[in-house]
Image: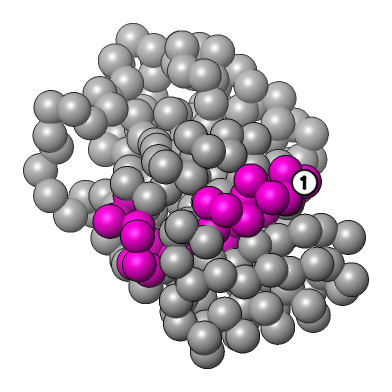
């Protein structure tokens, strides 16, 4: 049984996501709110929340500033952005600012359920269709730098294949299926990749590797 807060100012969407949770995670306790101030108040009242589903554009949010405020108030509660936004930079910035996932409102019901399940299991969820798209704007100075070639050279072919799948937003389970290897093997490869690339987590690896032409390294 999970305790989940839906923070969104559209009643119909709140009802829809509530139904997704009720069907996919029976007996979960679901709370709803329509603005950031109420969401902040509820996180203070309920320190045992398992997940917050947060709309980017509801009153009080001011874009990603609302996410930052919520993360400051409740640093231990996982926050997932649920938004109609489909810009890759917004998705990556949300993860950089502390969200553990980004679900687009146009996602099919089954995909939403899968995303929430992945996040409740401790994984980061990224929308693979958006992550696969090219960057929407030129690289800016404050963005994550690309991985130096010598660090990529240190990866084995299988690790490169796993990293490529990671940049597409695939979960360990999806990578294991697509590469026909065990999920435990994928986890071992991910740990080795993070160590070799000198990054602290999966998101940093994905951000750093976003522009890499994997085919050039896989041809060697």
Residue that badge 1 annotates: 48
What residue is rendered at 57% in x and 53% in y?
41
Is residue 54 magenta-colored? Answer: yes
Question: Residue 82: percent from the left, percent from the top?
Answer: 48, 65
Query: Is 189 left, or right, of 107 in this rendering?
Result: right
For the C terminus, give its image quadrant.
top left
Q: Position of residue 64 (x, y in %)?
A: 33, 49
Q: Residue at x 53, y 32 (%)?
A: 202
Nearest to the observer: residue 85 or residue 185 = 85
Q: Is residue 119 visible?
A: no
Q: Residue at x 63, y 50 (%)?
A: 43
Report the number of numbered marks: 1
Rendered location of residue 207, percent (x, y): 36, 35
Task: Say if 146 sits above or below 195 in the image.
Answer: below
Residues rendered magenta in the picture: 39-64
Instruction: Give how far across and how far down residue 73 sits, in percent.
Output: 53, 38
Q: Nearer the viewer, residue 162 or 108?
A: 108
Q: Nearer the viewer, residue 185 or 170?
A: 170
Q: Is residue 199 above or below residue 125?
A: above
> Residue 192: within the magenta?
no
Position of 87 with respect to 18 (left or right) is left
SS label for mark 1: loop
């Amino acid at each position: 049984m999970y305790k989940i807060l839906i923070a969104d100012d559209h009643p119909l969407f709140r009802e829809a996501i509530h139904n997704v949770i009720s069907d996919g995670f029976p007996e979960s306790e679901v709370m709803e709110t329509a603005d950031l101030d109420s969401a902040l108040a509820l996180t203070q009242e309920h320190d045992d929340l398992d997940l917050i589903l947060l709309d980017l554009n509801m009153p009080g949010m001011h874009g990603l500033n609302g996410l930052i405020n919520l993360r400051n108030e409740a640093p231990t509660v996982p926050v997932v952005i649920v938004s109609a936004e489909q810009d890759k930079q917004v998705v990556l910035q949300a993860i950089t600012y502390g969200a553990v996932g980004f679900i687009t409102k146009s996602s099919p019901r089954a995909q939403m359920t899968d995303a929430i399940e992945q996040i409740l299991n401790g994984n980061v969820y990224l929308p693979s269709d958006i992550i696969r798209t090219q960057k929407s704007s030129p690289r800016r100075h404050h963005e994550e730098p690309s991985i130096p070639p010598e660090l990529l050279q240190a990866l084995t072919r299988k690790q490169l294949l796993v990293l490529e799948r990671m940049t597409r937003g695939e979960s360990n389970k999806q990578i294991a299926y697509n590469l026909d290897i065990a999920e435990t093997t994928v986890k071992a490869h991910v740990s080795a990749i993070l160590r070799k690339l000198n990054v602290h987590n999966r998101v940093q690896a994905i951000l750093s590797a976003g522009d890499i032409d994997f085919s050039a390294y896989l041809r060697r």
